[in-house]
Amino acid sequence: QVHQVESGGGLVKPGGSLSLSCAVSGFTFSDSNMAWVRQAPGKGLEWVAWISASGASIHYAESVKGRFTVSRDNAKSSLHLQMNSLRAGDTAIYYCARESGYGWAIFDYWGQGTVVTVSS
Amino acid sequence: DIQMTQSPSSLSASVGDTVTITCRASRNINNYLNWYQQKLGKAPKLLIYTTSRLQSGVPSRFSGSGSGTDFTLTINSVQPEDFGTYYCQQSSSIPYTFGQGAKLDI
């Protein structure tokens, strides 16, 4: 059974940093591309970042490029998102999502999310 | 970026109705269109991928169609458990954009 559990969310001041993690089990993590998707309060879904199975290829949304860094530890089956220079607009639930084997950016498993609040 | 526009933004249905939600892309995405269902306080759930392929475990009353820029999600004989918000998402090119959502009330 697949489990994806995000952690690391919390309250942070504008300009601050936060590090999110997603612990994965139930599938071969090192074979799967992964992504972070966020959802601002009462809003829709926004793709944030994508990382290939090996970690060699990474893509970011323009809104976070230069501030966020996605990484993974295949030995520990974990996905990470380092968030720097946080803004109020980064306030959201952050989900880690597995890219299915059906094709690019088809996300078949999602974690329950971790809440990030950026406020003074 | 490819903009995804869903309509309607909200809709109400009775049990047994047929419901249709449309999604329009700002440019051709071929058939790289996926649909997700999200219930309040829960993570999104993949329903349909690549326009019309039903994800494993999803009831057959859900179906998808379309090509190019115009796509449709249809729910035949809506059930009480189908309430929630439905999002389309294009996987044709980065950034992978979502529609704004369509909230279905039963």
Image: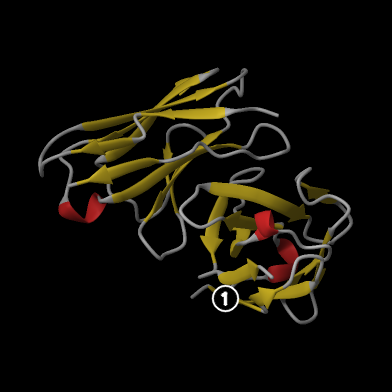
Extreme front residue here? Answer: A120
Q: Residue at x 39, y 44 (%)?
A: B86
| Quadrant in which residue A114 is drawn | bottom right
Give, as a three-letter code, the residue at label 1: Gly
Q: How many marks?
A: 1
User: Residue B42: image x %, image y %?
Assistant: 42, 64
Label 1 neighbour load within 10 Å: few <14, some 14-19, many 20+: few
Q: Residue at x 66, y 40 (%)?
A: B96
Q: Residue at x 82, y 66 (%)?
A: A15
Name the residue nearer the viewer: A109 or A91.
A91
Asked if residue A74 lies left or right of residue B8, the reply is right
Name the residue nearer the viewer: A95 or B45.
A95
The colour mode here is: secondary structure
User: Residue A87: image x %, image y %?
Assistant: 74, 59
Asked if residue B62 lies left or right of residue A79, the reply is left
Extreme bottom residue here? Answer: A76
Asked if residue B17 lies left or right of residue B98, the reply is left
Q: Residue at x 10, y 40 (%)?
A: B16
Point out the image quarter for the C terminus of chain A. bottom right
- Mark 1 residue element: loop
| Quadrant in which residue A3 is drawn | bottom right
Q: Is residue B43 above or below residue A46?
A: below
User: Residue A81: image x %, image y %?
Assistant: 76, 67
Q: Is residue B87 above or below residue A19?
A: above
Residue B33 visible (yes or no): yes
Residue B49 visible (yes or no): no
| Quadrant in which residue B102 is drawn | top left
Name the residue nearer the viewer: A15 or B34.
A15
User: Residue B43: image x %, image y %?
Assistant: 46, 62
Host chain of mark 1: A
Q: Is residue A62 above or below residue B26?
A: below
Disc 1 target residue? A26
